[in-house]
Image: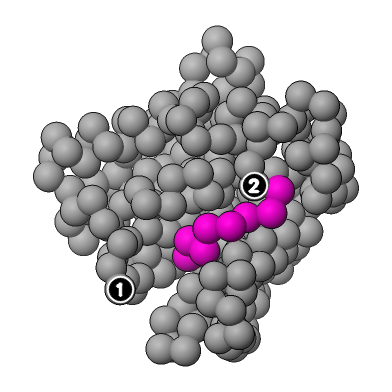
Amino acid sequence: IVMLHGCTQSADDFAAGTQMNRLADEHGFLVVYPEQAAQANHSKCWNWFKPQDQGRGAGEPSLIAGIVREVAQRHGADPRRIFVAGLSAGAAMAVVLGETYPELFAGVGAHSGLACGSAHDIPSALAAMKGGRSGLPGLNTVPGAARAPCSQAAQAVPVIVFHGDRDHTVQQTNGAQIVQQALDAHAAQAGAAGLRLSTHSGVAPGGRRYSRNVHTDAEGQARIESWTVHGAGHAWAGGHASGSFTDSKGPNASAEMLRFFMALPRAGSA
């Protein structure tokens, strides 16, 4: 599982907050934490909003994909069981990676993130974060943004989304846009088959209420899962207080993403 931190975070900070290493020890998988350099972005954000970092074969998606391939080869990981997840800017970049490298990533986890192609520069990124859709769907008509590939996603990569409904940094409408983008991609790929929706709700051990929508295919396989954490802000649900941007009261996003990923068929398999 590739874990992409949010703005101002480090790999160590993100590891502490998500507790993904503990799950890796329990279940026997590798975790990779690429870290953004301050020279590439002063706030250490992944540059998900730049056209040159939204395509295949160049920019940050290419760098991260290269890291993932090298680690997988070096440690003998199953190349069909590689997943990517992130928080905020890291979630936005995870969605970009699912679109640009669908043969590499068998599933995507997006916590408090944005859809692929949501922006083409910093002003449009800030507008998208506040719930504006300045980058969609006309991104490819914006001067200088011709290389951005995914204002309309084409790759039906399975995705699990978490978002707090009190998130005032990245509005919840962005999580809904990730889901809609995935639904559109699945509809285009599956034709009339479509996906079946089931809804669930509950209360996490920490006290946060949540709603969960699950979209399954004809075989009953979950392809899109979306969690709304009620009353939560811009923070990793179920996270540990030793890391920044965490909410210990919510459902355990790390464990739920792992469950979703492990239940998926291997990438490239029928």
Tell me the element at label 2.
loop
Q: Nearer the viewer, residue 256 or 100?
A: 100
Q: Dot 2: within a 10 Å radius of its alpha carbon, few (fewer than 14), some, or many (20 or more) residues? A: many
Q: Could you tell me which quadrant the C terminus lies in? A: bottom left
Q: Badges 2 and 1: C-beta atoms under 8 Å apart?
A: no
Q: Residue 150 bears which disc, if any? A: 2
Residue 156 counted in the magenta span: yes
State the residue at coordinates (21%, 41%): 72
The location of residue 134, given as percent across then percent down, is: 86, 43
Q: Is residue 38 visible?
A: yes
- The image quadrant that residue 73 belongs to is top left
Residue at the spot of label 1 = 270
In the image, residue 191 sits, relative to residue 162, either above or below, namely below
- Callout 2 amino acid: Cys
Q: Is residue 162 left or right of residue 65?
A: right
Residue span colored magenta: 151-158
The location of residue 98, given as percent across then percent down, is: 49, 50
The location of residue 112, given as percent across then percent down, is: 64, 51
Q: Nearer the viewer, residue 185 or 125?
A: 185
